Amino acid sequence: MPYSSEHKSQSRNRILASAVDLFCRYGFDQVSIGEVMKHAKMTHGAFYTHFKSKSLLYAQAIQHAAKHSLWNKEKPSVLTLTALKQLISAYLSLPHVTQKQASCPLAFLATDVAHRDEVVRNSYAKVFQNLAQSIAVELKNWGVKNAESLSQQILTSMIGTVSIARSLGDETSQQLLLDNAKNNLFSLLSGLSNKPVDG
Amino acid sequence: MPYSSEHKSQSRNRILASAVDLFCRYGFDQVSIGEVMKHAKMTHGAFYTHFKSKSLLYAQAIQHAAKHSLWNKEKPSVLTLTALKQLISAYLSLPHVTQKQASCPLAFLATDVAHRDEVVRNSYAKVFQNLAQSIAVELKNWGVKNAESLSQQILTSMIGTVSIARSLGDETSQQLLLDNAKNNLFSLLSGLSNKPVDG
DNA sequence: GTCTATATGATGATAGAC
DNA sequence: GTCTATCATCATATAGAC
């Protein structure tokens, strides 16, 4: 066999990483399959041995991005308040918004996904719900009562803020929006150590 | 003159309304100029006497949507807490998310705008900042100290929630997300009547 | 101002050589 | 499995008749 299945798997991962990067940066419609493949050091025609369509690539790319996200890679086994605050700070930062670091597909593709087929939307929803559930589990460990609700609130605030910040353009407005959201989240979280929530 | 300038203005408004509707529903890239014109009861070729390019139509459409938004049309001259809560309820509702009522471009085009040229991004930013400022003015009238900050928090929460809800697909998840955000905003606002903010 | 017709280019996807 | 070459389609934008 001239090509090992490991080789195929590596090519596939290169395509997925390329797709995540380009889709987040320029949007799904504005990135062609040819560009994705070029960025992955392959040619246009080779694409279709790995994915049946561009839309299915999108669905897989969202999963790939989630798997390799900061949350899944740097989260300690038990999440402390300090660690969560660090994650929030990194997320609500100018380098994240301006793509100097890995992009979160939940924020960068939020409204884009709404226009795609059900497979893509389900992929997005799965990532969102898994993450919300992961955070809720940690919050429960801290004794938070309405953990699912609070987890959703934290996530929507983070994702919404980054989404909007990207569309504002100038970095001064972006920084103001990010700092404001960070302060609000931090004071929300500080309340947890002082008093029981949902009490 | 066979066509009055009023007629031209009406045609232009039909095109803008059509563009807002279709862009919010399907996304900028997935809507062609031909479709926009067809929806406005005109032909493709007539487009270019009204707008120089599709991108400039986008920038104008965002302004048009803001001008005809629920906020600009139904906001009473002096905003009461009750009226604000009603606006939030309408915004964070399933009919809004599923496009049974007029769509807010800030939420529906949030990540889409980030990939466009500076003219489009400036148009979006202008609408966001104007709205944030309008709300801040009302909050100041209520005696809120950190009015700008709170206004931004309310807006990002609303826009972020609707953006994400649209990508989740199933209406049960959407309703949960919307209700949760509404409750959080309402308790945030309830705090205003009991105690001074930023004190 | 609006129409029909068209120039020009890019895209998603396929066919077949290696 | 990856390549080159190609098909079929659809996009933006323009030209010219009415």
Image (cartoon, coloured by chain):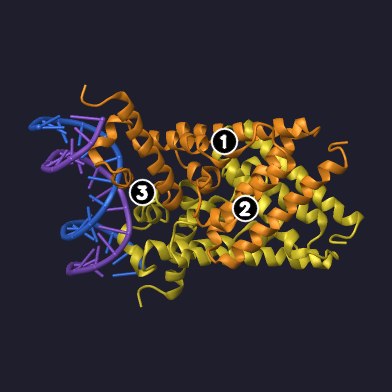
Chain colours: A yellow, B orange, C purple, D blue
Q: Amino acid at mark 3?
A: Val
Residue at position x 57%, y 58% in the image: B94
- Residue of label 3: B31
Q: Disc 2 on helix, strand or loop?
A: loop
Name the spot of residue B20 as percent of width and height, x first. Answer: 43, 43
Q: Give the label, 3 or 2, closer to the camera.
A: 2
Quadrant in the picture for the N terminus of chain A: bottom left
Q: Which residue is mark 2?
A: B92
Q: Chain of mark 1?
A: B
Q: Quadrant of residue B116?
A: top left
> Going by the image, does A72 lie left or right of B196?
left
Please give the chain letter of the residue carrying mark 2. Answer: B
User: x%, y% of residue B164?
Assistant: 58, 55
Q: Is residue B178 visible?
A: yes
Residue depicted at x 78% and y 62%: A79
- Nearer to us: label 2 or label 1: 1
Residue at the image position 69 percent from the left and 43 percent from the top: B84
Separation (CA) of disc 2 from disc 1 = 17 Å
What residue is disc 1 on? B72
Mark 1: which amino acid?
Answer: Asn
Label 1 crowd (10 A; few <14 / some 14-19 / many >=20): few
- Is there a contact, CB below 8 Å, between mark 3 and mark 2? no
Cα–Cα gap, marks 3 and 2: 26 Å
* CA distance for labels 3 and 1: 26 Å
